[in-house]
Image: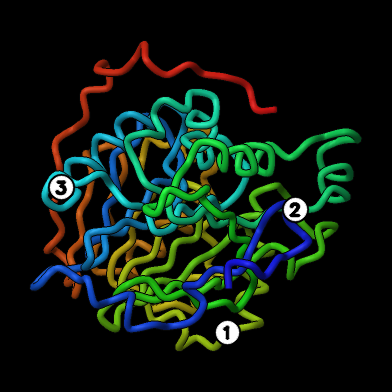
């Protein structure tokens, strides 16, 4: 499987996790529960971490560059028996720095990478024509640059170079006790129809103990309308919904088609509401009334244990952001 090349992405191969295998679950820790962690962020962005029953992780984005050492501390703290954290999949949803910043920081300061094992990096990215038309002639994809260069610093548990996997619409990946479906990949929508670069966001649906968690990244209006054309309303019977773009890209036209118990990832005081996008904020309030609970950023990290029932989450104390304030060099995207 790992020798099957995909030509649309440098050095990308097909993931072995596209095919279910009992090997994925044989090393599960007895009585372990799958958990979803929403670590506190220094700034806006996405950072969602699933811990599987085998103790491994799936990391969605990670946030800005400043979050790197705090994320590594968090992974180490929760790794089983003090082992080095193993990330089965590091997902990079799109090329905005508040989502890919941790990968960017790791490439520029690779000494941090020695603290983790990364079995695979998963991403999608727009082609050169889209970059030139939407961002200007000669624009180089920061995401492609940093993801491709990350292969020089990450190692798998077998000591091999970490492979790159390009996600595609409709794929299902199997990790230990859960599945991860690619609900939306930006290549199904012509780039001429994108309103903003948020339209390149990959949307993922995780199924855990029969419950669904939808991670929307920054997906924009046009993406959400395409998803409604693809899926029946029953597909969006959700336990947890991550409201896209920090709560700013919540649209009634989409959310009227979902059922949801818990909303996570939006909050008063984020950059979106601070910009005074009142109409979108009111749409968020309509969605808020639809759910059983609404959990905001800025109040400490969150932990959800599956099967999850509203009100059973744990919230962690606020992070002391001064610990590493001089340790992460902030660099410009290439």
Q: Quadrant of residue 89?
A: bottom left
Badge nearest the viewer, 2 or 1:
2
Badge nearest the viewer, 2 or 3:
2
Give the x, y percent position of residue 142: 68, 36
**Residue to which mark 2 is pinned:** 126
Q: Quadrant of residue 31?
A: bottom left
- Cα distance between the residues tagged 2 and 3: 37 Å
Q: Are marks 3 and 1 in contact (CB under 8 Å)?
A: no
Q: Are marks 2 and 1 in contact (CB under 8 Å)?
A: no
Give the x, y percent position of residue 166: 63, 61
Q: Quadrant of residue 133?
A: top right
- Cα distance between the residues tagged 2 and 1: 23 Å
> What number is the disc on residue 315?
3
Q: Residue at x 55, y 53 (%)?
A: 93
| Quadrant (top left, top right, bottom left, bottom right) of the C terminus | top right
Q: Residues within 10 Å of mark 2 (few under 14, many from 20)?
A: some
């Amino acid at each position: 499987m790992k020798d099957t090349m995909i030509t649309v992405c440098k050095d990308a191969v097909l993931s072995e996790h596209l095919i279910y295998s009992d090997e994925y679950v044989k090393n599960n820790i007895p009585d372990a529960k799958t958990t979803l962690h929403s670590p506190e962020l220094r700034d806006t962005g996405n950072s969602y971490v699933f811990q599987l029953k085998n103790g491994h992780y799936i990391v969605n984005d990670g946030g800005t560059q400043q979050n790197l050492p705090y994320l590594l501390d968090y992974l180490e703290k929760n790794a089983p028996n003090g082992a080095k954290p193993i990330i089965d999949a590091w997902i990079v949803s799109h090329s905005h720095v508040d989502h890919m910043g941790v990968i960017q920081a790791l490439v520029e300061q690779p000494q941090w990478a020695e603290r983790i094992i990364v079995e695979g990096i998963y991403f999608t990215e727009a082609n050169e024509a889209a970059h030139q038309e939407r961002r200007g002639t000669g624009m180089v994809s920061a995401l492609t640059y940093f993801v491709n260069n990350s292969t020089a610093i990450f190692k798998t548990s077998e000591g091999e170079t970490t492979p790159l996997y390009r996600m595609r619409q409709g794929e299902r990946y199997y990790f230990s006790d859960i599945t991860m479906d690619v609900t939306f990949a930006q290549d199904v929508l012509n780039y001429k129809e994108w309103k903003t670069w948020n339209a390149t966001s990959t949307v993922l649906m995780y199924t855990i103990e029969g419950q669904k968690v939808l991670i929307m990244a920054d997906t924009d209006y046009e993406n959400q309308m395409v998803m409604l054309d693809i899926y029946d309303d029953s597909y969006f019977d959700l336990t947890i919904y991550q409201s896209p773009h920090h709560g700013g890209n919540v649209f009634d036209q989409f959310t009227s088609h979902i059922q949801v118990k818990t909303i996570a990832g939006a909050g008063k005081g984020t950059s979106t509401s601070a910009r005074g996008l009142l109409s979108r904020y009111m749409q968020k309030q309509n969605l808020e009334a639809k759910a059983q609970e609404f959990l905001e950023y800025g109040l400490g990290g969150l932990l959800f244990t599956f099967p999850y029932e509203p009100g059973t989450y744990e919230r962690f104390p606020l992070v002391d952001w001064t610990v590493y304030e001089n340790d992460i060099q902030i660099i410009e995207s290439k």
